[in-house]
Image: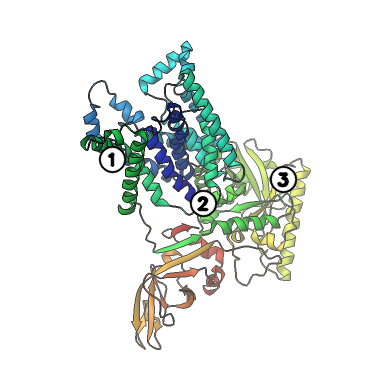
Amino acid sequence: MNERKDFGRIDIFRIAAAVMVVAIHTYPFADVSRTLDFVFTHVICRVAVPFFFMTSGFFLISHYAENGKKLTEFVKKTLIIYAVSIAVYIPINIYSGYFGGDTNFLQDIIFNGTMYHLWYLPASVMGACIAWFLVRRLDYGWAIAISAVLYALGLLGDSYYGVAESVGVLKTVYDALFRVFEYTRNGLFFAPIFFVLGGFAAEKRCYGKGAEKLLFVLFLDLMIGEGLLLNMFGNQRHDSMYIFLVPAVWYLFMLLLKGESRRRKTLTRAALVMYIVHPMVIVGVRLAGKIFGLEGLLVENNLVHFLAVTVISAIFAILWAELIPSRRKEKHLRAWKEIDLSALRHNAQALQGMCRSGCELMAVVKADAYGHGAYDVSVCLEKSGVNAFAVATIDEGIDLRKSGIRSDILILGYTEHKRAGELRKYRLTQTVVSYEHAKALDNENKAIDVHIKIDTGMHRLGFDAGDIEGIMKCFEMKNLNVTGVFSHLCVSDESSVESDSFTRGQISAFKRVVGEIKKNNATDIKTHLQSSYGLLNYPDIECDYVRAGIALYGVYSSEHDMPRHEADILPVLKLKAKVVQLKSLASGETAGYGRCYRAEKPVTIADVSIGYADGVPRNFCGDVMINGKAAPVVGRICMDQLSVDVTDIPDASVGDTVTLIGDGVTAEMMAENTATITNELLSRMGKRLETVIK
């Protein structure tokens, strides 16, 4: 769930980590000093694989989820790579006699890998799934705690096995464990903590800001001391896991996140290929040494052997990454909306700044967040500190819960009493609109939170403002926990004297109801009355929430609106499409349905890949932007296309981007042109529009 795009330092370090893995398997300093080689290969280089795990977690793990698609894609991709790698190494397995003797093939497939380095791939799959489950179900506190316990159990089967071996009960337990898997360096004990920490770093934006370099060096030094002590006393069954490895990798990662650097996707692919192929290169270098009589140099000289394997592996990996096309699907956009989340965060902060002290923003994300995408908008806002959301229907609320939103969610519309069980299951707050509605919900015997809607003059949903008796009966219902009361201002966007008088009457009526409720000892309820224009025109109303809708998305309902208090808001959405064909029309020729457009002179028209099925009103006849110039729409809007006069844009060509909203053409202008308001215009954006997050 990371919105930043500048993690190039992570990509660069992937190559360094791949080199460390090569070092682990080639012992570069063994000829110089066994202690130096141990410290380098069996301690320092042990940060490599946890770094890979943490990097995957950084881009993958989050308690927010859009149908679990990212996890599914990661698992599928990793298993394909694993299957291909197993197949590639079968000849070496055969040569080494792997398939003979007492090989536990099933154990190796699930935990250890069929080659000594391939364990990383099934460990990634298992670690990612465990981390995903823990974070989604329990959030980061428990996820970190449980994965830390798993890591501690792994330590006793790895570097601290001597401790477990000396305690009879523990020895029995670990003997049993090692009948299931050969090492605790696997996806169950080793990987989860780093996946979880990677997700935590991304979601909480724990980017490097302070003494990361000093802390990394400190914990790396402590890890070196830990490794030397364990090696001295012969405690280790293996040497992949250390106590100080976890903080060392954390601060290394924080150091890499510090500052900005352009992504280098080629290095990402190259590092993986280098990791996969280097054992094959080791075999090749040894074979070349034997064939050419260079064993003394290429094999027995460990440093040269390491350098040869590293250079050949790196060359192969970079060539592969550069020359073999990525199978990553490119988006070929037809029509799309661009969503600027930085503008959304700015708007939320600006509107919150306009609220009275003690009043919070309640983000209205109904109708797919006014066409902006409820998932992306809600995740962004919750991560930015918004703690309350409003939707129109129970299903919209359920979708937010399934996406990982944990803040309060109020359903503004009517929900049938038979769905009370779902209201409770998904911790949704339901609006009760009448005594009969409240009673029906109460009779379902499901304890649920509710807000009471008061009709102060709009005469839509809600208790009549004078029905104090009916309102108070809701507080007596055993299954309804009344946590709030609200109303809606119906002309707060208008500036006439009559409208202002009516709005102030609504405000007074609401205050009277709230006063009566609190007089009856219901003092801890939350109140809210203002929507966007309620805040912009009547900011001094004393309430606990402001329900920010259209203004949150950086637009006003109409271009003629002149609120008493201007908000410093920015448009969040741009609507774009492509020029797909150019045509020349002679004077007098017609185009489109009904032949309603007739050329008065020779013109060039561009067919654009967007229509009313994408949300462009059928009666739209304003301007769009192409190559920074305005161009008028001509003829009727079709379901899937529209036409634009580009006679005065001689450089217009097929493939050019056409901006219908944005770059000087506002949603307010389109709404005015089509005799509607932006609320309707944005909310009816078609589902087939692609979404590009900026």
Q: Amino acid at mark 2?
A: Glu
Q: Does any portion of residue 417 appear in the rendered image?
A: no
Placement of 157 over or under 425, stated as above or below: above
Find disc 1 in the rendering and name its residue.
84
Asked if labels 2 and 1 touch by Cβ distance under 8 angstroms, the answer is no
Frontmost residue, 525 versus 168:
168
Q: Amino acid at mark 1?
A: Val
Q: Residue at x 62, y 58 (%)?
A: 347
Q: Does any portion of residue 614 appear in the rendered image?
A: yes
Binning the other alpha carbons within 10 Å of mark 2 as few (below 14), some (14 to 19) or many (20 upward) gives some
What kind of element bears circle 2?
Answer: loop
Frontmost residue, 658 versus 4:
4
Q: Give me the C-alpha separation between circle 1 and circle 2.
A: 32 Å
Give percent across and percent down for residue 600: 40, 88
Frontmost residue, 623 versus 17:
17
Placement of 672 over or under 458, stated as above or below: below
Binning the other alpha carbons within 10 Å of mark 3 as few (below 14), some (14 to 19) or many (20 upward) gives few
What kind of element bears circle 3?
Answer: helix
Give percent across and percent down for residue 303: 37, 36
N-term-proximal mark, 3 vs 1: 1
Mark 2 vs mark 3, foreground winner is 2
Find disc 2 in the rendering and name its residue.
3
Mark 3 vs mark 1, foreground winner is 1
Asked if labels 3 and 2 touch by Cβ distance under 8 angstroms, the answer is no
Find disc 3 in the rendering and name its residue.
469
Q: Residue at x 55, y 61 (%)?
A: 572
N-term-proximal mark, 2 vs 3: 2
Mark 1 vs mark 2, foreground winner is 1
Q: Give me the C-alpha separation between circle 2 and circle 3.
A: 50 Å
Q: Residue at x 31, y 46 (%)?
A: 316
Q: Is residue 194 left or right of residue 531?
A: left
Binning the other alpha carbons within 10 Å of mark 1 as few (below 14), some (14 to 19) or many (20 upward) gives few
